[in-house]
Protein backbone atom coordinates (compact mmCIF):
# COMPACT_ATOMS: atom_id res chain seq x y z
CA UNK A 1 0.00 0.00 0.00
CA UNK A 2 1.45 3.34 -1.05
CA UNK A 3 0.74 6.45 1.03
CA UNK A 4 1.69 9.94 -0.15
CA UNK A 5 0.96 13.04 1.91
CA UNK A 6 0.25 16.21 -0.05
CA UNK A 7 -0.14 19.51 1.78
CA UNK A 8 -1.76 22.41 -0.06
CA UNK A 9 -2.46 25.97 1.08
CA UNK A 10 -6.14 26.59 1.64
CA UNK A 11 -7.74 29.18 -0.59
CA UNK A 12 -9.62 32.11 0.85
CA UNK A 13 -13.22 31.05 1.20
CA UNK A 14 -12.26 27.47 0.36
CA UNK A 15 -13.05 24.20 2.06
CA UNK A 16 -11.66 23.66 5.55
CA UNK A 17 -11.52 20.35 7.36
CA UNK A 18 -12.60 20.36 11.02
CA UNK A 19 -9.78 21.46 13.30
CA UNK A 20 -9.36 18.00 14.83
CA UNK A 21 -9.27 16.23 11.49
CA UNK A 22 -6.26 15.01 9.56
CA UNK A 23 -5.73 15.53 5.85
CA UNK A 24 -8.45 14.17 3.62
CA UNK A 25 -7.74 10.55 2.65
CA UNK A 26 -7.76 10.10 -1.14
CA UNK A 27 -8.14 6.43 -2.03
CA UNK A 28 -7.34 4.70 -5.29
CA UNK A 29 -6.10 1.46 -6.79
CA UNK A 30 -2.84 1.86 -8.68
CA UNK A 31 -3.75 -0.99 -11.06
CA UNK A 32 -6.60 0.85 -12.78
CA UNK A 33 -4.82 2.17 -15.83
CA UNK A 34 -5.45 4.49 -17.54
CA UNK A 35 -7.68 5.89 -14.77
CA UNK A 36 -5.61 5.62 -11.59
CA UNK A 37 -2.00 4.51 -11.23
CA UNK A 38 1.34 5.12 -9.51
CA UNK A 39 3.36 8.32 -9.83
CA UNK A 40 5.05 7.32 -13.10
CA UNK A 41 1.65 6.67 -14.73
CA UNK A 42 -0.93 8.45 -12.56
CA UNK A 43 -3.89 8.05 -14.86
CA UNK A 44 -6.43 10.52 -16.17
CA UNK A 45 -8.77 10.23 -13.18
CA UNK A 46 -6.01 10.71 -10.62
CA UNK A 47 -4.61 13.70 -12.51
CA UNK A 48 -8.06 15.28 -12.66
CA UNK A 49 -8.76 14.61 -8.98
CA UNK A 50 -5.47 16.01 -7.73
CA UNK A 51 -5.97 19.12 -9.84
CA UNK A 52 -9.48 19.55 -8.40
CA UNK A 53 -8.09 19.28 -4.87
CA UNK A 54 -5.31 21.72 -5.68
CA UNK A 55 -7.76 24.28 -7.03
CA UNK A 56 -10.10 23.77 -4.09
CA UNK A 57 -7.20 24.19 -1.66
CA UNK A 58 -7.79 20.87 0.09
CA UNK A 59 -4.82 19.11 1.76
CA UNK A 60 -4.92 15.34 1.29
CA UNK A 61 -3.11 12.07 1.83
CA UNK A 62 -3.04 9.77 -1.19
CA UNK A 63 -3.55 6.09 -0.36
CA UNK A 64 -3.08 3.58 -3.18
CA UNK A 65 -4.34 0.21 -2.02
CA UNK A 66 -6.17 -2.82 -3.48
CA UNK A 67 -9.57 -1.87 -4.83
CA UNK A 68 -11.73 -3.94 -2.51
CA UNK A 69 -9.82 -2.73 0.52
CA UNK A 70 -10.23 0.91 -0.50
CA UNK A 71 -14.00 0.53 -0.81
CA UNK A 72 -14.23 -1.45 2.43
CA UNK A 73 -12.37 1.21 4.39
CA UNK A 74 -14.67 3.96 3.17
CA UNK A 75 -17.80 1.94 3.87
CA UNK A 76 -16.44 1.16 7.34
CA UNK A 77 -16.34 4.86 8.13
CA UNK A 78 -12.93 6.09 7.00
CA UNK A 79 -13.19 9.84 6.39
CA UNK A 80 -12.08 9.99 2.81
CA UNK A 81 -12.89 9.98 -0.88
CA UNK A 82 -12.30 7.40 -3.59
CA UNK A 83 -11.39 7.82 -7.26
CA UNK A 84 -12.93 6.18 -10.29
CA UNK A 85 -15.93 4.53 -8.67
CA UNK A 86 -18.68 3.42 -11.02
CA UNK A 87 -22.09 4.56 -9.83
CA UNK A 88 -24.26 1.46 -9.84
CA UNK A 89 -27.61 0.69 -8.20
CA UNK A 90 -25.89 -1.67 -5.75
CA UNK A 91 -23.55 1.10 -4.57
CA UNK A 92 -26.03 3.97 -4.63
CA UNK A 93 -26.67 4.11 -0.88
CA UNK A 94 -23.14 3.15 0.17
CA UNK A 95 -21.30 6.32 -0.88
CA UNK A 96 -21.84 10.03 -1.35
CA UNK A 97 -21.41 10.84 -5.04
CA UNK A 98 -19.35 14.04 -5.24
CA UNK A 99 -18.31 14.65 -8.86
CA UNK A 100 -19.19 12.84 -12.06
CA UNK A 101 -15.88 12.84 -13.91
CA UNK A 102 -16.23 10.61 -16.95
CA UNK A 103 -18.56 8.14 -18.64
CA UNK A 104 -17.13 4.66 -19.19
CA UNK A 105 -18.81 2.81 -22.08
CA UNK A 106 -18.03 -0.89 -22.43
CA UNK A 107 -17.64 -1.59 -26.14
CA UNK A 108 -16.33 -4.01 -28.71
CA UNK A 109 -13.41 -2.29 -30.43
CA UNK A 110 -12.27 -3.59 -33.79
CA UNK A 111 -10.09 -2.67 -36.72
CA UNK A 112 -12.67 -3.72 -39.27
CA UNK A 113 -16.18 -2.66 -38.21
CA UNK A 114 -18.31 -1.53 -35.32
CA UNK A 115 -19.95 -4.43 -33.51
CA UNK A 116 -23.11 -3.78 -31.53
CA UNK A 117 -23.33 -7.21 -29.89
CA UNK A 118 -21.07 -10.02 -28.80
CA UNK A 119 -22.99 -12.40 -31.05
CA UNK A 120 -22.07 -10.32 -34.10
CA UNK A 121 -18.40 -10.25 -33.18
CA UNK A 122 -18.17 -13.93 -32.31
CA UNK A 123 -19.82 -14.85 -35.60
CA UNK A 124 -16.87 -13.21 -37.38
CA UNK A 125 -14.04 -14.59 -35.26
CA UNK A 126 -12.35 -14.59 -31.87
CA UNK A 127 -12.98 -11.98 -29.19
CA UNK A 128 -10.34 -10.94 -26.67
CA UNK A 129 -11.04 -9.84 -23.08
CA UNK A 130 -9.03 -9.35 -19.90
CA UNK A 131 -8.96 -12.58 -17.93
CA UNK A 132 -10.95 -12.73 -14.72
CA UNK A 133 -13.17 -9.76 -15.56
CA UNK A 134 -16.96 -9.81 -15.89
CA UNK A 135 -16.43 -9.00 -19.58
CA UNK A 136 -14.49 -12.23 -20.15
CA UNK A 137 -17.15 -14.21 -18.31
CA UNK A 138 -19.96 -12.58 -20.27
CA UNK A 139 -18.25 -13.22 -23.60
CA UNK A 140 -17.55 -16.87 -22.75
CA UNK A 141 -21.15 -17.36 -21.62
CA UNK A 142 -22.66 -15.90 -24.78
CA UNK A 143 -20.16 -17.09 -27.37
CA UNK A 144 -18.58 -20.16 -25.81
CA UNK A 145 -15.16 -20.36 -24.20
CA UNK A 146 -13.58 -21.41 -27.47
CA UNK A 147 -14.45 -18.07 -29.06
CA UNK A 148 -12.81 -15.96 -26.35
CA UNK A 149 -9.11 -15.30 -25.82
CA UNK A 150 -8.44 -14.29 -22.20
CA UNK A 151 -5.35 -12.11 -21.70
CA UNK A 152 -3.60 -10.72 -18.63
CA UNK A 153 -2.47 -7.39 -20.05
CA UNK A 154 -4.06 -4.80 -22.34
CA UNK A 155 -1.02 -4.83 -24.62
CA UNK A 156 -1.63 -8.52 -25.33
CA UNK A 157 -5.10 -7.58 -26.50
CA UNK A 158 -3.63 -4.86 -28.72
CA UNK A 159 -1.25 -7.34 -30.36
CA UNK A 160 -4.05 -9.85 -30.99
CA UNK A 161 -6.24 -7.17 -32.54
CA UNK A 162 -3.42 -5.67 -34.61
CA UNK A 163 -2.34 -9.07 -35.94
CA UNK A 164 -5.88 -10.03 -36.91
CA UNK A 165 -6.02 -13.06 -34.63
CA UNK A 166 -8.96 -11.46 -32.83
CA UNK A 167 -11.72 -9.53 -34.57
CA UNK A 168 -12.75 -7.52 -31.51
CA UNK A 169 -11.75 -6.60 -27.98
CA UNK A 170 -14.42 -6.28 -25.29
CA UNK A 171 -13.22 -3.53 -22.97
CA UNK A 172 -13.85 -0.14 -21.41
CA UNK A 173 -13.49 2.18 -24.39
CA UNK A 174 -11.02 4.56 -22.71
CA UNK A 175 -8.76 1.68 -21.69
CA UNK A 176 -8.74 0.25 -25.18
CA UNK A 177 -7.99 3.63 -26.78
CA UNK A 178 -5.17 4.30 -24.33
CA UNK A 179 -3.60 0.88 -24.80
CA UNK A 180 -3.79 1.22 -28.58
CA UNK A 181 -2.17 4.65 -28.45
CA UNK A 182 0.50 3.46 -25.99
CA UNK A 183 1.49 0.77 -28.49
CA UNK A 184 2.18 3.48 -31.06
CA UNK A 185 -1.02 3.18 -33.09
CA UNK A 186 -3.52 5.88 -33.99
CA UNK A 187 -6.68 5.52 -31.85
CA UNK A 188 -8.69 6.73 -34.83
CA UNK A 189 -7.96 3.35 -36.49
CA UNK A 190 -10.31 1.66 -34.05
CA UNK A 191 -14.01 1.24 -34.67
CA UNK A 192 -16.70 0.52 -32.12
CA UNK A 193 -20.45 0.04 -32.16
CA UNK A 194 -23.04 0.90 -29.56
CA UNK A 195 -21.93 0.44 -25.93
CA UNK A 196 -22.94 -2.89 -24.45
CA UNK A 197 -23.22 -1.08 -21.12
CA UNK A 198 -22.18 2.28 -19.70
CA UNK A 199 -21.39 3.50 -16.20
CA UNK A 200 -20.64 6.98 -14.93
CA UNK A 201 -17.36 7.08 -13.03
CA UNK A 202 -17.35 9.32 -9.96
CA UNK A 203 -15.22 10.82 -7.29
CA UNK A 204 -17.15 9.51 -4.29
CA UNK A 205 -16.98 9.96 -0.53
CA UNK A 206 -17.53 7.98 2.61
CA UNK A 207 -20.95 8.57 4.14
CA UNK A 208 -19.08 9.43 7.33
CA UNK A 209 -17.03 12.23 5.77
CA UNK A 210 -17.42 15.49 7.76
CA UNK A 211 -18.42 18.62 5.83
CA UNK A 212 -19.10 16.54 2.73
CA UNK A 213 -21.56 18.99 1.21
CA UNK A 214 -19.07 21.86 1.40
CA UNK A 215 -16.36 19.68 -0.11
CA UNK A 216 -18.67 18.59 -2.90
CA UNK A 217 -19.45 22.17 -3.89
CA UNK A 218 -15.78 23.14 -3.96
CA UNK A 219 -14.78 20.12 -6.04
CA UNK A 220 -17.65 20.52 -8.49
CA UNK A 221 -16.68 24.16 -8.93
CA UNK A 222 -13.04 23.21 -9.47
CA UNK A 223 -13.92 20.60 -12.08
CA UNK A 224 -16.20 23.05 -13.88
CA UNK A 225 -13.30 25.50 -14.22
CA UNK A 226 -11.07 22.69 -15.49
CA UNK A 227 -13.64 21.91 -18.17
CA UNK A 228 -14.02 25.57 -19.09
CA UNK A 229 -10.30 26.39 -19.35
CA UNK A 230 -9.33 23.23 -21.27
CA UNK A 231 -7.40 21.52 -18.47
CA UNK A 232 -9.66 18.46 -18.47
CA UNK A 233 -9.42 18.10 -22.25
CA UNK A 234 -5.61 18.37 -22.06
CA UNK A 235 -5.50 15.58 -19.46
CA UNK A 236 -7.65 13.36 -21.66
CA UNK A 237 -5.53 14.13 -24.74
CA UNK A 238 -2.42 12.78 -23.02
CA UNK A 239 -4.12 9.39 -22.75
CA UNK A 240 -6.35 9.00 -25.80
CA UNK A 241 -5.13 11.64 -28.25
CA UNK A 242 -6.54 15.08 -29.12
CA UNK A 243 -9.38 13.97 -31.40
CA UNK A 244 -11.05 11.62 -28.93
CA UNK A 245 -10.24 13.97 -26.05
CA UNK A 246 -12.20 16.78 -27.67
CA UNK A 247 -15.38 14.70 -27.98
CA UNK A 248 -14.97 13.11 -24.55
CA UNK A 249 -14.44 16.47 -22.86
CA UNK A 250 -17.70 17.62 -24.39
CA UNK A 251 -19.45 14.57 -22.97
CA UNK A 252 -19.90 12.88 -26.33
CA UNK A 253 -18.77 9.74 -28.15
CA UNK A 254 -17.77 9.55 -31.76
Image (cartoon, rainbow, N blue to C red):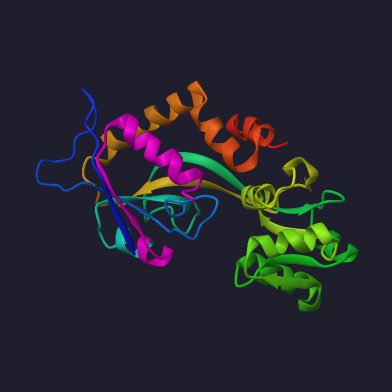
Residue 217 visible in the snapshot: no
**How far across and how far down the image is residue 216, in percent?**
33, 36
The residue at 37%/63% (across/down) is 65
- Could you tell whether 168 is left or right of 97 in the image? right
Residue 83 visible in the snapshot: yes
- Could you tell whether 149 is left or right of 37 in the image? right
Query: Which quarter of the figure is the N terminus placed in?
Result: bottom left
Q: Is residue 62 magenta?
A: yes
Query: Which quarter of the figure is the C terminus placed in?
Result: top right
The residue at 38%/54% (across/down) is 93
Q: Nearer the viewer, residue 87 or 135?
A: 135
- Could you tell whether 98 is left or right of 21 in the image? right
Q: Nearer the viewer, residue 149 or 209?
A: 149
Image: 140 above or below 221: below
Q: Is residue 112 magenta?
A: no
**How far across and how far down the image is residue 95, in percent?**
36, 52
The residue at 24%/40% (across/down) is 59
**How far across and how far down the image is residue 214, in percent?**
26, 34
Q: Nearer the viewer, residue 8 or 58?
A: 8
Image: 77 above or below 14: below
Q: Which residues are magenta?
A: 41-70
**How far across and how far down the image is residue 189, in percent?**
80, 44
- Find residue 74 and report its image quarter: bottom left
- Find residue 148 and report its image quarter: bottom right
Which residue is farthest right?
Answer: 124
Amino acid sequence: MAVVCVLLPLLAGGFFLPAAAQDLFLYGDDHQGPFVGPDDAPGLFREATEEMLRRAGVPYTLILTPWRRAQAELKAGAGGIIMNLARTPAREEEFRWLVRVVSTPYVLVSRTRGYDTLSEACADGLVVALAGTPRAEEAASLCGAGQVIPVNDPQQAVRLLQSGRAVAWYEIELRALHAWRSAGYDPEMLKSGRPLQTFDSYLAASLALPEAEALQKRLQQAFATMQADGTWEAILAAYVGPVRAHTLAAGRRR
